[in-house]
Image (cartoon, rainbow, N blue to C red):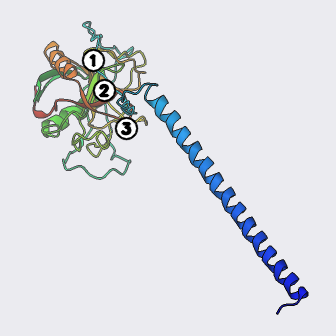
Amino acid sequence: MATNQQRREAAKRKLERQLVRRAEQAKRRKIVGAGVVGGVVLIVAGLVVWIVNSGGSGDQQAAAPPSSSAPPVPSVTNIPTERTALPKRPKALPNPTTCSYPADPSGKPPSGKKATAPDGKSVSSSGTVNITMKTTQGDIPMTLDRALAPCTVQAFEALAKQGFYTDTICHRLGVTDLQMLQCGDPDAKGDVTTDGRGGPGFTVPDEFIDTAKYGRGILAMANTGQPNSGGSQFFMVYGNAPLQPQYTIFGSISDEGLKVLDKIAKNGIGAIGQDGSTGEPKQQVKFTAVTVS
């Protein structure tokens, strides 16, 4: 039989166990309560989001389509009908003159098309050369003017006679602020990310005229922005072209050719280039033959 002391100790241990159990139960109730409150908060937040997105009604609404960051494809507007007159040199160039066509220093890989630079000796700076660029969109006759740019005319005529332009495409079309068609890249494949870098392997000297204006009917040489960096690429202006006189003008486009350029422009742009305003022609423009007279 237990003594009073033993009974008191047993009662004490029982009480301690009861206190521990009560503490643990209180702790569990607190945790469960917090979880319930958190769940209620999430449910309420979800309801608020649903109500906002559904416009506050019980009808299901279609989600708005994600906005596209791609710029819209521009289309041609307001093609002028008045031609821009060819500039005139304030002083005539020596006749004959001498031209230099050094190798392209850019280190570009050689094109699949072989081109031979003219010798540049005794180059005439008077008279004209008639050239017709036959394309898949129609013929584009043009007149090259030696008095404006004898070296550029000689280089372009030489490339045309060598068949350099045949089977090449026009890779860049402008239809908004800069209304022109650029051609002459022998490596162009209709890819706006890579086209516009090819050339004949030699460079053509600059023959700028300070008072030059670019506009409808003007034929000019493209360049890289560096001095004397022209090559085989050129552009034909059918409309507005607010450019600084940093591109050699070497001829003009006939009325028949301008009609073809207008049609190409109205067909529109396919893929947009990095500048966001020009791109490849929607319908391919390919030179099928070139005649020189």
Q: Position of residue 237 (x, y in %)?
A: 27, 20
Residue at label 2?
Answer: 73
- Identify which residue, 19 or 91, lies in the foreground: 19
* Residue 76's disc number: 1
Report helix, strand or loop for mark 2.
Answer: loop
Residue pushed farthest top? Answer: 82
Lower sequence index among marks 3 and 2: 2
Q: Amino acid under label 3?
A: Ser
Quarter assignment of residue 282: top left
**Mark 1 and mark 3 in contact (Cβ < 8 Å)?**
no
Q: Amino acid under label 2?
A: Val
Compared to 179, does 271 lie above or below? below
Compared to 261, does 228 lie above or below? below
- Identify which residue, 267 or 123, lies in the foreground: 267
Q: Nearer the viewer, mark 3 or mark 1?
A: 1
Q: Nearer the viewer, mark 2 or mark 1?
A: 2
Task: Say few, some or many: other residues with alpha carbon within 10 Å of mark 3 (under 14 / 14 to 19 / 20 or more).
Answer: some
Residue at the image position 23 percent from the left and 44 percent from the top: 187
**Where the C terminus falls, by quadrant?**
top left
Residue at the image position 24 percent from the left and 49 percent from the top: 111
**In 3D space, how far apart are the residues under numbered discs 3 and 2 (Cα atoms)?**
30 Å
Residue at label 3?
Answer: 229
**In 3D space, how far apart are the residues under numbered discs 3 and 1 (Cα atoms)?**
30 Å
Q: Amino acid under label 1?
A: Val
Q: Position of residue 57 (x, y in %)?
A: 43, 25
Report helix, strand or loop for mark 3.
Answer: loop
**In 3D space, how far apart are the residues under numbered discs 2 and 1 (Cα atoms)?**
10 Å
